[in-house]
């Protein structure tokens, strides 16, 4: 199953946008793609955007696994999705033992706040 993913560096933040619902069959592929981007770019922070149909329950497990990866790597990670149910699900199931997962409704806000957190920490 092909899952459309795009990425960019904005304000020093790796922004990965998931455009499609991965479904149960695409979760492993999506996790691998995002993990490879995080490891390949070695960013200081990551914003994961669940765009439109990607904001589905099937993507939540992938997001939580990426959050654990980012926590292990010491990276700040934020998620942006317009779906209030998905935001609540992510907040309720985020790993409390690592870096806090910030879940927001807007991608531009997530990028701006994540970049600001980097500047403040520097």
Image: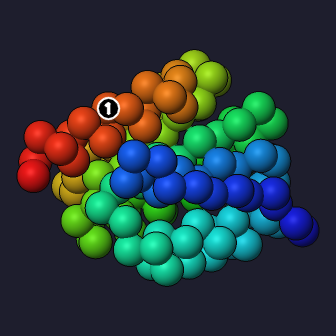
Q: Residue 112: image x %, image y %?
A: 37, 32
Q: Label 1: few (<14), some or many (≥20) within 10 Å?
A: some
Q: Residue at x 24, y 36 (%)?
A: 116
Left or right: 52 in relation to 68: right
Left or right: 106 in relation to 72: right
Left or right: 54 in relation to 106: right
Q: Nearer the viewer, residue 9 or 69?
A: 9
Q: Which residue is mark 1?
A: 113
Q: Residue at x 48, y 40 (%)?
A: 79
Q: Residue 90: image x %, image y %?
A: 47, 38
Q: Residue 67: image x %, image y %?
A: 40, 57
Q: What color scheme is it?
A: rainbow
Q: Nearer the viewer, residue 101 or 4?
A: 4
Q: Quadrant of residue 68?
A: bottom left
Is there any visible trace of residue 91 in the rendered image? no
Is there any visible trace of residue 39 in the rendered image? yes
Q: Quadrant of residue 31?
A: bottom right
Q: Residue at x 27, y 71 (%)?
A: 72
- How many marks do you count on the picture? 1
Determine whether 32 is above or below 23 in the image. Answer: below
From this viewpoint, which residue is outermost toward the front?
11
Left or right: 34 in relation to 101: right
Q: Residue at x 37, y 66 (%)?
A: 43
Q: Residue 44: image x %, image y %?
A: 30, 61
From this viewpoint, which residue is outermost toward the right?
1
Quarter of the picture holding the N terminus: bottom right
The secondary structure type at the circle numbered 1 is helix
């Amino acid at each position: 199953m092909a899952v459309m993913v795009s990425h960019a560096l904005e304000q020093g933040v790796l922004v990965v946008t998931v455009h499609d619902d991965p479904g149960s069959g695409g979760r492993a592929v999506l996790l691998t793609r995002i993990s490879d981007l995080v490891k390949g770019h070695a960013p200081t922070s990551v914003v994961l955007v669940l765009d439109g149909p990607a904001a589905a329950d099937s993507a939540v497990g992938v997001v939580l696994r990426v959050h654990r990866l980012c926590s292990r790597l010491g990276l700040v990670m934020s998620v942006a999705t317009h779906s209030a149910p998905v935001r609540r699900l992510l907040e309720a199931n985020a790993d409390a033992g690592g870096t806090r997962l910030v879940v927001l409704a807007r991608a531009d806000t997530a990028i701006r706040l994540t970049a600001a957190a980097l500047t403040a920490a520097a």
